[in-house]
Amino acid sequence: MSDQPNADRERDDGALFWTGTVLGWAIIAFGLKLLFDDPEASWFNTLRLTAIGIVAHDIVWLAVSVGGTWLVMRALGRDIPHWIRWATWTSAIVIAMWFPLWRGYGDRIRNDTILPRDYRASIIILLIAIWLGGAAAALVARRRQLSDG
Amino acid sequence: MSGRSITDDATAAIESATIDERRAAILGVSLGITFTLCALTGLFSWGASQGAAWWPARPAGLYRVTQGVHLVSGVVSVPLLLAKLRTVAPRLVQRPLITSFAHAVERISLLPLVGGSIFMLFSGVTNVAYWYPQEFYGIDIGYFFPAAHGKMAIVVMGALVAHVCAKIVTTREALRRETVANESPAETLDRRRFLGGVAATAGLVGVTVAGATVYPLRGVGLLSARHPTSGPQGVPVNRTAAAAGVRSVATSADYRLVVEDASGELAAYSLSDLRALDQHEYELPIACVEGWSASARWRGIRLRDLLAAAGVDEAREVDVVSIQEETARGRRYGTSTVSAEVAGQHDTLLAMELNGEPLHIDHGFPVRLIAPNRPGVNQTKWLAKVVVT
């Protein structure tokens, strides 16, 4: 997803680039045709969600990424230990991914074999494990560094 | 922060995210692998559920493996994709925004790739979590998951082909370089820590869902939406009898399993007639599109024996039709086609027992299909008819 201009394209990979572009867009067009032709895919809703994804990436993600990093740096200073950055990032991903499990949306299906666990407890246990694991890894690395140096 | 403007800090934040081509290349290759695994296993799942001729009847557990790989590689892709977006996002605002026609084409090709990838992972994760949102901030986003997810996968793979061809030279060069130009040892360490952290996160989220299908990981499958032994008779259920609206018909004393062809009814069997036929027992997995699977002992009549008893000389392609096909609710998946190859397998059963007990109604009482290497949606429950085609 890098979009840095490749100055050597005309010389090195021009043929490959254009072949890939033509082939790729042919496949994209085929996929879109299937999407439009399938009434069950509800193409309008699918493309709308995809557009939301693009906006989320290009407008929201970039702004949040830069703004969030600036705020965290301002609040904590530049020397945030790596393990804290990792644990924060990983915790955010776990919560964002499994928010539906936390809320128990699947329970509405009324099937006892779906979502058999206490997912709030699971997520909390996982978050604790992430922070403890991160701290332990940092401690081990620190000790190794001290013994080496 | 004295002496520094917001712009300076924002620039530093961007620089901290823009590490190097090598980081982007490693993440790109990793995503390429997980996305390709997802696409291939998704294609297998589509072929298996559609009864494609190229999908084999054996090995019996192949679908549970491919769909387990689909689940884990999809979930693992989420942190990889976020890390990749985090790494390359600042380049979106580099000036000039467009340098050539080719560059403009390359940037446009990112739209289906990024938007489609986010859609795929979002829809996949919500489906695994059994969240079927009808509303999203007031917007109706209803769609039929397999149709939308499958078709959008083709769009994403097309965009991936274009992206890989655009970036393969840059990526190869970045991976070949021993060191990154102008990178200090501290920055090298930071890059390695970042990538190590991403790998750890990806591994962590993968392990916590893999327990839905990998038995040894059941204990740490904290976020698995299923437990392989949780359910009536120790096996999970996807659609209950209540949800399918079949309870009264399935438990009726008048129940008959009819075998028919184009000329009409060939035979009809009551439950006691079926129990009087030769019974066979096999251990077969049941594996679902959501990625969970479970092994169980199934006992019943071989499909080929039933066809022979009804006067059908050889194993033929048949449609197995559920009672739910005749009810108002749950018409989807009410019928599935069994190829002649599958119908002829020794362990393709019309099962009436599960793990040593009569089938629980949620598992398809009185009779259900269980066959090797088929998706759970095609292991039709509450059978009413077997139609020779």
Image (tube, coloured by chain):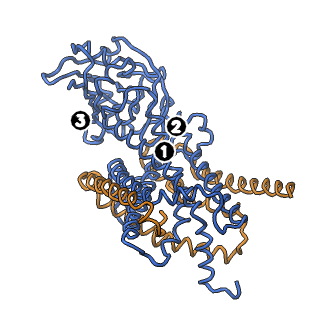
Chain colours: A orange, B blue
Q: Are marks 3 and 2 on the same chain?
A: yes
Q: Quadrant of residue B279?
A: top left
Pick whichever of labels 1 and 3 is earlier in the sequence: 1
Task: Please name the amino acid that badge 3 sits on.
Answer: Glu
C-alpha gap between disc 2 and disc 1: 9 Å
Question: Pointers 1 and 3 in contact (CB under 8 A)?
Answer: no
| Image depth: mark 2 or mark 1 in front | 1
Secondary-structure class at tag 2: loop
Q: Are marks 2 and 1 on the same chain?
A: yes
Q: Quadrant of residue A51?
A: bottom left
Which mark is on residue B326? Answer: 3
Pick whichever of labels 3 and 2 is earlier in the sequence: 2
* Residue corresponding to mark 1: B71
Pick whichever of labels 2 and 1 is earlier in the sequence: 1
Task: Please name the amino acid that badge 1 sits on.
Answer: Leu
Q: Is residue A48 above or below residue B346?
A: below
Q: Chain of mark 1?
A: B
Q: Is residue A143 visible from the viewing direction of this image?
A: yes
Dot 2: within a 10 Å radius of its alpha carbon, few (fewer than 14), some, or many (20 or more) residues? many
Q: Position of residue B326 (x, y in %)?
A: 23, 35
Q: Position of residue B86 (x, y in %)?
A: 55, 65
* Residue corresponding to mark 2: B213
Q: Quadrant of residue A23?
A: bottom left
